Image (cartoon, rainbow, N blue to C red):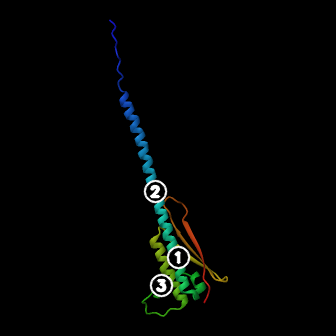
Amino acid sequence: MHGTFKQSQSGFGLIEALVALVVVSVGMIGIAVLYGQGLSASRTAYYRTQAVNLASDMADRIRLNRRAGASYNGAGASNNCQAGGNVDCTTAQMAAQDIFEWQAQVAGQLPGGAGTVTYSGTTPPTYTISVSWQEVGVVDPLTLQVAVRVPDL
């Protein structure tokens, strides 16, 4: 009479299930982190694209009003010089209007956005267009600078 007693293991399946749950949970957390980083990267890319488009817009405005020269160094002012206005504007007034409108666009399209233009009287004249904005999670504002050489007419 040989009796074999089998001892059954109890609880082993539960441990396997808990380990599998932990592995899946870590994987899901990793996916969530990657998703968040992807959203952040796409937001940063969007702001950079906006900054490039805004700098290009100001470069086009300068090219259309090349005789204004150093007037683009000054502060912007609303002179009612936009299309359809009934005011005859000088090149300096048009430059001030361009800066006024452009800075409003920069502030409206970028968080904490600010735009400046500096003029250098070299040959050909060089304009440095700077667009700054505040990125989420970054202490210092990001800045895009573009140097544009526009020969006089």
Q: Residues within 10 Å of mark 2 (few under 14, many from 20)?
A: few
Residue 56 tag number: 1
Real-space Cα distance between discs 2 and 3? 40 Å
**Chain-order first, disc 2 or disc 3:** 2
Residues 5 and 112: in front is 5
Tag 2 secondary structure: helix
Q: Quadrant of the N terminus?
A: top left
Q: Residues within 10 Å of mark 3 (few under 14, many from 20)?
A: some
Q: Residues within 10 Å of mark 1 (few under 14, many from 20)?
A: some
Quarter holding residue 80:
bottom left
What is the tally of numbered marks visible in this picture?
A: 3
Q: Residue at x 51, y 71 (%)?
A: 51
Q: Which label lies toward us, 2 or 3?
A: 2
Real-space Cα distance between discs 1 and 3? 21 Å
Quarter holding residue 10:
top left
Q: Inspect the image, locate mark 3, and give the three-letter code of the amino acid beneath it.
A: Ser
In this rendering, the answer to whether 26 lies above or below 18 is: below
List the residue tagged with mark 2: 38
Tag 3 secondary structure: loop
**Chain-order first, disc 1 or disc 2:** 2
Residue 78 tag number: 3
Mark yes or no: residue 139 visible: yes
Residue 69 tag number: none
Q: Position of residue 50 (x, y in %)?
A: 48, 70
Q: Of all residues shown, which one is farthest toward the top? A: 1
Real-space Cα distance between discs 1 and 2? 27 Å
Q: Inspect the image, locate mark 1, and give the three-letter code of the amino acid beneath it.
A: Ser
* Residue 117 horizontal side relative to residue 16, left or right: right
Q: Inspect the image, locate mark 2, and give the three-letter code of the amino acid beneath it.
A: Gly
Q: Residue at x 48, y 94 (%)?
A: 88
Residues 142 and 63: in front is 63
